[in-house]
Image (cartoon, rainbow, N blue to C red):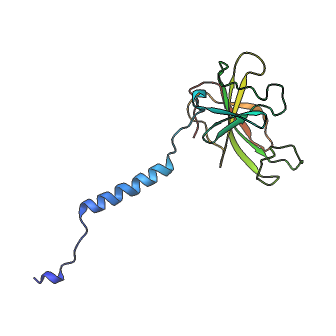
């Protein structure tokens, strides 16, 4: 036989490696890891234009601007987790009825996650909110439906246990 007539074949290990990489990429996009509300010890706070604001990554919150306690931090106020809510709403067309930082057009449906922490007293609370591309699905924990339909025509879901997670 003439050696120049043989075609070089890729090795079996190369086939296995490319198959493994393809499978890992497929599984990585198919199965998202579960997420939960941040622990308050991870949240940072700062005073900004007379209002105390809270942040951890994409999670954001603030005290009510203009309220008597707007400048007060509740990070060390003995707060505990109260509930997580998976929610949607439609951006209102009424001027000034939404967050002034909204970038979506009126009528746009937005999905978000709310994490509420409460303590002693009516004002001892923090709500962290994270906008998401689509409404997450409940994962672990006992999830319940709220009793009213939101402006997006869906029912918000909430969970009151620290073990609650979502995907």
Query: Where in the figure is residue 158, as x and y percent of width and height?
Result: 68, 31
Outermost right residue: 94
Numbered circles on residues, count: 0
Query: Where in the figure is residue 15, as x and y percent of width and height?
Result: 30, 62
51 or 167, which lies in front?
51
Q: Is residue 133 left or right of residue 64?
A: left
Q: Residue at x 34, y 60 (%)?
A: 18
108 or 69, which lies in front?
69
Q: Residue at x 70, y 26 (%)?
A: 73
Q: Quadrant of residue 68?
A: top right
Q: Is residue 9 left or right of residue 64?
A: left
Q: Is residue 90 left or right of residue 17?
A: right
41 or 12, which lies in front?
41
Q: Residue at x 35, y 58 (%)?
A: 19
Q: Is residue 73 above or below residue 61?
A: above
Query: Where in the figure is residue 143, as x and y percent of width and height?
Result: 64, 30
Q: Which image quarter is the N terminus in? A: bottom left
């Amino acid at each position: 036989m003439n050696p120049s007539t043989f075609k070089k074949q890729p090795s079996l290990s190369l086939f296995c490696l490319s198959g493994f990489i393809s499978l890992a990429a497929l599984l990585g996009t198919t199965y998202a890891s579960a997420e939960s509300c941040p622990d308050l010890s991870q949240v940072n706070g700062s005073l900004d234009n007379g209002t105390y604001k809270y942040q951890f990554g994409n999670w954001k919150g603030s005290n009510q601007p203009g309220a008597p306690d707007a400048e007060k931090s509740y990070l060390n106020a003995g707060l505990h987790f109260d509930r997580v809510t998976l929610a949607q709403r439609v951006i209102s067309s009424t001027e000034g009825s939404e967050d002034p930082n909204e970038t979506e057009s009126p009528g746009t449906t937005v999905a978000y996650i709310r994490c509420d922490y409460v303590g002693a007293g009516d004002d001892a609370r923090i709500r962290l909110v994270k906008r998401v591309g689509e409404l997450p699905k409940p994962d672990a924990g006992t999830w319940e439906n709220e009793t009213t339909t939101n402006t997006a025509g869906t029912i918000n879901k909430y969970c009151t246990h620290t073990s609650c997670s979502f995907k």
